[in-house]
Amino acid sequence: MSILAGKLGLVFGVANKRSIAWAIAQAWHQAGARLAFTYQGERLKENVAELAGAFGEDTVVLPCDVTKDEEIAEVFRQVGERFGKLHLLLHSVAFAPREALEGEFIHTSREAFRVAHDVSAYSLVALAREGAPLMTEGGSILAMTYYGAEKVVPRYNVMGVAKAALEASARYLAYDLGPKKIRVNCISAGPVNTLAARGIAGFAEMLKHYEAHAPLKRNVLPEELGAAGTFLASDGAAAITGQVIYVDSGYQIMGM
Ligand code: NAD
Ligand code: 0WE
């Protein structure tokens, strides 16, 4: 079932094979999309090039630190040159300085707040603005978020505030880009053991907490994020925009 046949996509946020971006990229690829990838810095170049190579040796792989306007501009210039147009864009990028994810939110420094919002929220606005002109046949922009945007998850701290900004940004972008048939949605994922999650104190307990309390009594699988991402990218979701879709084993519905 090639529901994304003929679609051209650009993926931000692959660090390694455990990245949520990689799970969604694989699903998009299996659904027939042709993809290009970006990586954050030299350190990740080989990793991403090797993974992307699985989709063919000529897969486009470009550097992009999302805090750098010049790098963003260059990515879309290159994608314009190689693809000519674009249908799908995945934003699977987040960062807050480590010290901001420890201890109390009240101690968040001005600089940590700025960095978290720049990398994790503003970047969606920048990527949407630069990507939209290539989405001449309409498109689907997808961003990854987390429940800490709407309820307090101890130690998620400034990332929760940045995710709230990301989700609100997705709604305003959905309004701006709707007339161009470009949809903007978020997937709110339950916890997944990735590079960004590893080393978070208490992460293993969080996985156990979901197993105990989520209606489905289990954690989310990366391929389930891929399947949801494929649906949102497909014409089956043609009338869905500005939404946050929970792929979290049902955890978000619980009050206790
Ligand atoms: P990951 O570490 O594999 O991915 C995070 C990515 O962000 C990396 O590829 C990293 O290179 C990129 N990144 C950070 N700063 C960047 C910058 N300045 N420029 C460009 N890229 C930058 O971890 P992941 O868990 O796959 O995270 C992907 C997304 O999913 C994030 O938005 C995260 O908040 C979200 N999310 C994760 C979980 C989870 O439990 N793992 C749950 C819900 C949502
Ligand atoms: O969005 C995230 C994590 C994003 C993240 C991770 C790190 C670790 C390394 C952002 N910045 C950094 N900075 C670093 O230095 N998640 C949804 C996973 C996550 O992180 C948590 C969680 C969950 C869930 C942190 C505290 C509590 C829960």
Image (cartoon, grey):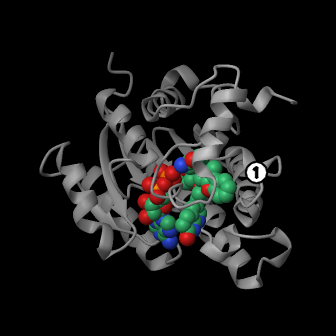
- Residue 176: x %, y % from top left: 70, 49
- Residue 156: x %, y % from top left: 71, 59
Image mark count? 1
| Amino acid type, callout 1 | Ala
Residue at 63% in and 29% down: 211
Q: For the N terminus, give its image quadrant.
A: top left
Q: Which residue is mark 1?
A: 149
Which residue is situated farthest in the left direction here? 57
Question: Where is 70 relative to 3, above or below?
Answer: below
| Whether residue 221 is visible | yes
Q: Is residue 136 left or right of residue 153?
A: left
Residue at 37% in and 71% down: 74
Q: For the C terminus, give its image quadrant.
A: top right
Badge 1 residue CB within 8 Å of ligand 1? no
The secondary element bearing badge 1 is classed as helix
- Residue 76: x %, y % from top left: 40, 63
Which residue is situated farthest in the top direction here? 1
- Residue 75: x %, y % from top left: 37, 66
